[in-house]
Image: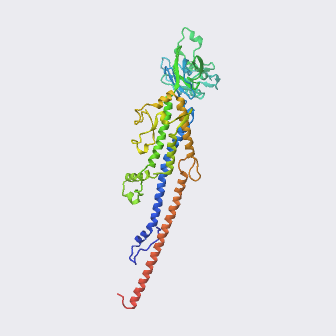
Amino acid sequence: MSDKLRMSGLISGMDTDSVIEALVSTKRQKVTTAKNDQKKLEWKQDIWKGINTNIKGLFQSHVSKMRFTSAYSKKTTSVSNSSVASVITGDGAVDATQKLRVEKLAKSAYLTGKDLNGDSNEKTFTASSTLADLGFEGGSDTISLNIGGVDQEPLAVDGSTTISDVLTYLKGAGLNASFDEDSQRFFVSAKSTGASHDFTLSDGGNGALAALGLKLATASEKEAEDFDQSDYATKIDGSNAVIYLNDAKFTGDTNTFKINNLTITALDETGDKEITLTTTTDTSGIYGMIKDMISQYNKSINEIDKYYNADSIRKYSMLTDEEKEAMKDKEVEEYENKIKSGLLRSDGNLSSLRTLFTGVMSSGIEIDGKTYYLSDFGIGTGNYFTTADNEKHALHINGDKDDSTVSDKADKLSEMIASDPELVTQFFSKLSQELYSKLDDASKSVQGYRSYGSFYDDKKMKSDYDGYKTTIKNLEDKANDYEDRLYKQFSSMETALANLQKKSSALAGLLGTSS
């Protein structure tokens, strides 16, 4: 309705607004119907997006990798003494029992400075304390650092050089360094283990390291009768790890070794003793992979069945604004959810997807001249008469402790993985290849209808949704134009009646019949 000034039925006595509203209502209803249809289409798009996400999850995260036999090469390694070593088993590791001996663990170089206060506790030094404060009387000196056999740029020092300056130098060269004011000591260490990260400190001979409590005792000093270890810094040299696997020697600057698809991390030294590493097929890992795929499959097929088998919603019409205002928000939500639940009832695209899924999962796979089915591995649908309508195509793994409907049955899948892993690998990889191929075809791009990777007509739906915008605007314009035209017509009628009334009054006056 436009904002133009409109005349009511003052002359005719008619309720003009009500009459026009009734005449325009049919066209307004077309606008409402178009808006409702657009809203339903929006809901359909949202439902399909959810279905599409579930199917893509099955397609990309499970079926895609399970079609390759390498996905079933899952191994696990048990360690006879887990305090000595831990093992991560990679794809391609061979079933074997191996001997491991850890002769030496890799260590980080670690330098602990001497207590700068000694037993006197006369002073407390901080990061801002200078070499002069520490008793350095050498005038000037240099501190040199070698890391892994590589000389670093030396640090020139004098009496004004602070502990903080020395820490900055050491950290800048790539070491961990700190000064603990409580113990009055420097702590310096390499950031990595191994001999290649070992470091040494030296000065120019004027006593800078001694003042800082970082000077190490020489061999002759250690042999002296009056040698006191507390008067000098101590250091643990960085060293490599040494292990023997099946009597073959391996060395490294860390405690982790990658050998023949095993990642072995040494945790403790064994001396002359050995422990055993036993690598076998990871039955639980293969089982878990298959179970996860079946779970995602059930999530997809159950959702398809839920919407395809939904109750009719013919008796539910879209709520008007007036009806919504008279209801609570939760009531509106519940009512609209009933409509949403039935929007894809008997949908042809859903039917095609369901046929695709059930067709592949019920098909036989030929291996070495014999045909196998999921049922041969203890996997099948539930009892037709006791299973809910929307779960009749869901698959169950006999013996699955998380599935109460079959948890009491024999675990045939685990048994077959343990007894014949090659058969399990061949069957599920071929089954996955077939399902992958079908889903790939179903998600191919269709000009004007669907984009690649979509299992529904997403492009067509978007195009239709955008088309409603134009349709709604055109219908609104027509309704407004029709309303304006009616008001003009009624206004003309009122004007005509008013002129007629004036003429009648004038004539009555001339004839002397005026009241």
Q: Is residue 250 visible?
A: yes
Vertical comparison of 413 with 241: above or below: below
For this rendering, which residue is in front, 14 or 420? 420
User: In the orientation shown, which residue stands out farthest toward the bottom?
Assistant: 511
Residue closest to the eye, 376 or 273: 376
Q: Residue pushed farthest left? A: 515
Can residue 162 be spotted in the picture? no
Placement of 145 over or under 457, stated as above or below: above
Q: Position of residue 221 (x, y in %)?
A: 58, 11
Return the residue found at the far top: 225
* Quadrant showing the C terminus: bottom left
Q: At x 41% / y 58%, what residue is drawn? A: 317
Q: Quadrant of residue 11?
A: bottom left
Q: Position of residue 468 (x, y in %)?
A: 51, 59
At 59% across and 24% down in the image, what residue appears? 260
Q: Is residue 1 above or below residue 253?
A: below
Query: Where does residue 503 sit, x and y in percent of width and height?
Result: 42, 86
Q: Nearer the viewer, residue 40 or 200?
A: 40
Residue 261 picture quarter: top right
Residue 89 occupies quadrant: top right
Query: Quick check: 102 left or right of 322?
Result: right
- Which residue is outermost to the front? 369
Image coordinates for residue 27, horizontal then vertical, percent? 46, 66
Q: Residue at x 48, y 43 (%)?
A: 300
Colour mapping used in the image: rainbow
Tell how many labels: 0
Left or right, 475 with reference to 329 = right
Who's the residue at 42% across and 39% down the image? 382
